[in-house]
Image (cartoon, helix red, strand yellow):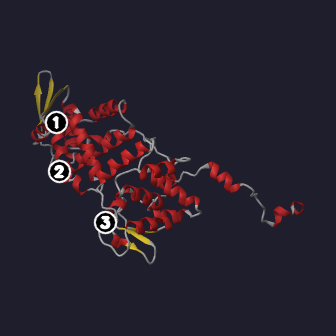
Amino acid sequence: MATITKRKNGWNVQIRRKGYPQQTRTLPTKADAQAWAREQEGRIDRSLAPVNLRLLKGTTLRQLLERYLEEVTPDKDSAYSEKVRLKKLLREQPLCDLALADLTPKVFADYRTARLAMVKPGTVHRELGLIRHALEVARREWDIDLPSNPLDRVKRPTLANARDRRLGHGEYDRLMFALSKTRNRLLGPVVEFAIHTAMRRGEILALRWEEIDWRHRTAYIADSKTGVPRTIPLLDEALGVLLRAGPPPRRGPVFPITMEALKQAWERLRERAGLGDLHFHDLRHEAISRLCEMGLTMPEVALISGHKDPRMLFRYVNLRPADLARKLSGRAWAASSPLSRAPDLL
């Protein structure tokens, strides 16, 4: 509760609340003092939790992120990439040495501006999102009494780096030739399977022989990025990759290779093929675009790709105008309405 006392130069207000710094101010009239006291106490009452300043001043963002890395990250599907991102953040950014009490929207806004001069918007977007979630977990689950999340008031960079990369003319042959020279016997089957199924890298590595239905020519994807399992049909080429890997019945992982080993092998492969700008995920763009070019409808393609939002699916469909022109060659629009064939009746 506020204490208001008369002084020679006006009315002095003192507000003491456990967990909050003391506030004091001198105002010319008692009414002004009472109004200011009500305003400040109202702000405290609207806070989500009382603030333990000693804890906030004694805990750094680095300590928070290290705990997040140890307790939260391992349970995520993206654990590998998030671990790499967090370790890089902890190693390079002086931001991590700030106390939680010193984290303000301006601090993160300045960090965002400085980082945008060095890296792509997508990188900054992911870093801020990761820090924001760590702060939110600390507030909700670790009894770290942040009154609010400072990143809630910071605008993240606009993402304008959506990729539309597909295999260009001759690039598939260059990729296959480079694969014939690789020493990793599993890399070729994984790459071909990705092109013929539109499956994500993590989905491919998690696929087990028990999830292949040879009779119905399908694969069951139990653990997907969206968290929703799905069953996809397998093209002849995809079945061929599986048959070359080993005759049924079999058990265990279809492609027994770790994520890190696959990433390293892919880096060597694309450099050998002279395709340094090709990402593994671009094979998913290639596969989905091929399915559309085969004549499948959008719902049919979505069943295979796992997209729930048509807008996201359209981002993956990169049809080539030249291919569409060849498809339209020799075809003409023909009116089917009787009225359009008899304009004299109108």
Q: Is residue 72 above or below residue 18?
A: below
First in residue order: circle 1 vs circle 3:
1
Distance Cα–Cα, label 2 vs label 1: 20 Å
Image quarter of the N terminus: top left
Across and down, in percent, residue 308 comes to: 45, 61
Location of mark 1 (residue): 99
Q: Nearer the viewer, residue 265 or 119?
A: 265
Residue ID for mark 2: 70
Q: Amino acid at mark 2?
A: Glu
The residue where tag 3 is placed is 253
Q: In the image, what residue occupies the spot 87% across and 63% down? A: 342
Q: Residue furthest right?
A: 344
Estimate the x, y position of residue 245 in percent, counting from the top left: 38, 66
Q: Outermost residue, bottom direction?
A: 215
Res. 84 visible in picture: yes
Mark 2 residue crowding within 10 angstroms, few (<14) / some (14–19) / many (20+): few
Name the front one of labels 3 and 2.
3
Marks 3 and 2: CB-CB under 8 Å?
A: no
Nearer to us: label 2 or label 1: 2
The numbered mark, 3 or 2, whose residue comes first in the sequence reads 2
**Mark 2 or mark 1: which comes first in sequence?**
2
Tell me if label 1 and label 3 are in contact, CB under 8 Å.
Answer: no
Distance in Å between CA atoms under marks 3 and 2 = 27 Å
Query: Residue at 34% of width from left, 70% of height from top?
Result: 209
